[in-house]
Image (tube, rainbow, N blue to C red):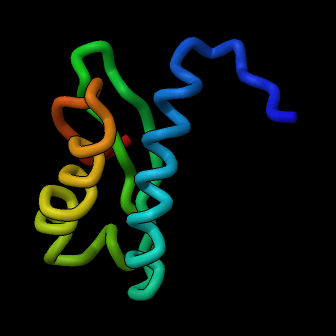
Amino acid sequence: MTVKSEDPDYELRSIIEGVLEDANRFLRIDGGRVSYVGLDPDGILKVRFEGSCAICPLLPMTLRAGVERAILLKVGNVRRVEISRA
């Protein structure tokens, strides 16, 4: 039995993290990873790239054509995906 968190955004965050995990299957091949940082009320999703992805010159392409596209297709509440620098 799965116990639901009392966080009202629990279901949305679970969907986002599932999409990010799908992306991670490909990113791990090259020693990288993307993780959820937060979603602001304006629909801006913050993610963090780690490992080799953090220094890859193709990071903007991975962000827009890979991660953001997958998120926008599956999550209606997200308008844009940005990299968290914090």
Q: Residue 20: where, in percent of width, then height? A: 43, 55
Task: Please say if 77 is above or below 29.
Answer: above
Q: What residue sits 20% from the left and 67% below the top? A: 62
Q: Residue 72: where, in percent of width, then height? A: 22, 42
Q: Quadrant of the C terminus?
A: top left
Task: Please say if 86 is above or below 56.
Answer: above
Q: What residue sits 36% from the left and 46% below the top? A: 47
Q: Residue 29: where, in percent of width, then height? A: 44, 87
Q: What residue sits 31% from the left and 45% below the top? A: 85
* Most foreground residue, 86 or 34: 34
Q: Quadrant of the N terminus?
A: top right
Q: Residue 33: where, in percent of width, then height? A: 45, 67
Quarter holding residue 26: bottom left
* Most foreground residue, 48 or 80: 80
Identity of the residue furthest to the right in this view: 1
For the image shown, how many numbered marks are present on the structure? 0
Q: Is residue 20 left or right of residue 79?
A: right
Quarter holding residue 61: bottom left
Report whether residue 82 is seen: no
Identity of the residue furthest to the front in this view: 1
Task: Please say if 10 is above or below 36.
Answer: above
Report whether residue 83 is seen: yes
Q: What residue sits 55% from the left and 27% below the top? A: 11
